[in-house]
Structure formats: C-alpha cells, structure tokens
C-alpha cells in the first residue's frame, strides 16, 4: 500500500477499491492530502484517475473509506457533500443558451433550501467569484459564445461558488493551449492560497502537474505506483515503464521537473 501524506490531512483515502461489474478499476488505494495542499493524480489513459476522483466526490460506489475532515463522505447526504466538496468533471455539460451568471449560480444550489431562490447574498458571492476568475465583463454572455479558456474559467467559477474546502478538478486544462492552461492553473493556485482550499486534480500534462502540484500520485492499472514530490515521482525509467514513452526529465531553474519526449533510438 503506497501512501501520499501531508501535514494536517484534510482528505484521507484508505484501501479504496472500485469495480465496474466484476473487474476492479481502482484497487486498494490509500493516500492523504494535507489541508491547503495541491495533489495531482497522473497516469496513462485508462489508469483509473477520473474514477478515483469520482469516488472522492461520492459519485461512484467503492469499498474502503474516504474521509474529509474526520467525516466519512459516505455518511454525508448528497446536499452535505455538495456543500463540502466542489467537483468539476472533465467534460461538464455547458448549456449553450445559459448565461455565465446563471451557470455560476448553479454552484449555490447546495446552499438553498427546498424550492428556495437565490438571495442577494448568493448573487454577491457569484459576482465576487466572477471577479476573481476575471469573468465579470462576461456575466451576461451565453455559454455557447465563450472561447475554450473562458468556458473553463466559467466551470472553475461554478465550483468556487459552492464555497467548499475541497476542490476536485478532472483535467481542468482539457482543450486549452499552453498559455490558457498556464493562466487557468495560475489562477487556481492563487485562489487556493487565498482560501486555504485543498485541491485534487487529474492532469495529463506531466510538466504542468510538476509545476503546480505540491505532490503527485502516479497511478497505473488502478493502483498507486509512486507518490511524493514531483521530482521523486517523475523519472525517465518510471515513465518509460508506465507510459511506454521515451522521455528525458529535465529541471527548471527553480528545480521543478520538465518531461520532454525524445524519439526512440533505432539500431
């Protein structure tokens, strides 16, 4: 059992196993994320990253335990989970005719009573969030008119509007070029620091994951094969084994690893 640990764990998984039918997709995963830390889950396609994130969000059945701030999430009602965990899937539904404001207001739904309407306080929270993700000028725009980067920021804003202490983001940079991806992750890191939020993301881009996450968990075939600081997890040998990729792992001036693909040498 491999375990990633941090100070004052906000989130703990113990021997989590998830099966679709008879076949396990995630097997015996244990990890801990420190309060206010950023954990990136990385691994090849089909490794179980998104499924693991769904288990933390309480969206799939699993064996084992997932604990948030000393409370098992399977003992929380769906509305309680939504007030404590913000989750954005890899490909969220974005109704084209909905305005940015109305979409972000959906993040306040867990805080409303039955049949209750949003209040002035809810609208104030949404306006504040839109300011923080630099979307205030697009409040009245319909989602169908947004660029890819603007749409991803709208998704982030909806999650932030829930005002939770745990943010789960499945591939938040999907479809973004390197500039927009960097801008989104910079903003997420700033918001994390301001709110002391705990962040768990899945990321395909290993270099971006190494630049922003405090710790990485590398999963393959449903299990953790390495966990720790990015420089400890990302080695050429390990990536060759689990990604079947030829790479060189370089280092930036601030000591963070950069994963560079190289062409295989042919005899």
Image: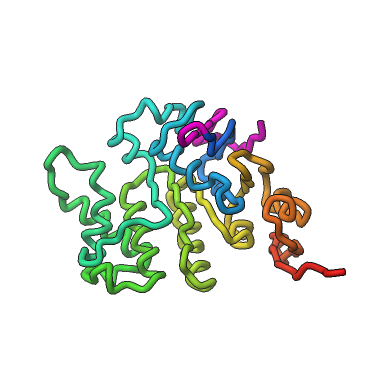
Q: Is residue 4 magenta?
A: yes
- Spot occupied by residue 240 in the image (x, y as percentages of width and height): 74, 55
Residue at (76%, 64%) from the top-left corner?
248
Q: For the C terminus, which image quadrant?
A: bottom right
Residue displayed at 27% across by 67% down:
143
| Highlighted magenta segment, given as a residue range | 1-22
| Residue 227 appears left or right of 148 | right
Q: Quadrant of residue 96?
A: bottom left
Q: Between 197 and 56, which is closer to the camera in this rendering?
A: 56
Q: Is residue 39 visible?
A: yes
Is residue 171 toward the left or the right of residue 145 in the image?
right
Q: Is residue 5 magenta?
A: yes
Task: Check the picture and name the quadrant holding the N terminus.
Answer: top right
The foreground one among 241 and 32 is 241
Between 234 and 191, the residue placed more toward the observer is 234
Toward the right, the furthest residue is: 267
What residue is shown at x 61% (from left), y 51% (from top)? 43
Residue lying at 51% horizontally and 51% vertically, measured from the top left: 201
């Amino acid at each position: 059992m491999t375990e990633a640990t941090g100070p004052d764990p906000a989130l703990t998984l113990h021997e989590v196993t998830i099966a679709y039918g008879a076949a396990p997709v995630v097997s015996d995963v244990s990890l801990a994320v420190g309060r206010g830390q950023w954990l990136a889950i990385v691994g090849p396609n089909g490794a179980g990253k998104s499924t693991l994130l769904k288990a933390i969000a309480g969206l799939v059945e699993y064996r084992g335990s997932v604990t948030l701030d000393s409370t098992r999430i399977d003992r929380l009602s769906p509305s309680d989970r939504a007030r404590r965990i913000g989750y954005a899937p890899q490909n969220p539904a974005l109704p084209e005719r909905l305005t940015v404001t109305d979409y972000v207001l959906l993040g306040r739904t867990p805080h409303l009573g039955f049949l209750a309407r949003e209040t002035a306080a809810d609208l104030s929270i949404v306006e504040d969030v839109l300011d923080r993700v630099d979307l205030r000028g697009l409040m009245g725009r319909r989602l169908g008119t947004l660029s890819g980067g603007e749409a991803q920021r709208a998704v982030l804003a909806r999650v932030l509007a829930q005002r939770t202490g745990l943010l789960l983001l499945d591939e938040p940079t999907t479809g973004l070029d390197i500039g927009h991806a960097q801008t989104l992750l910079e903003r997420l890191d700033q918001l994390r620091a301001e709110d002391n939020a705990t962040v768990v993301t899945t990321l395909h881009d290993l270099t971006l994951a190494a630049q922003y996450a405090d710790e990485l968990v590398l999963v393959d075939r449903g299990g953790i094969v390495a966990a720790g600081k990015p420089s400890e997890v990302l080695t050429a040998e390990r990536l060759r084994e689990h990604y079947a990729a030829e790479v060189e792992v370089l280092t930036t001036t601030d000591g963070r690893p950069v994963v560079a693909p190289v062409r295989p040498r042919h005899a």
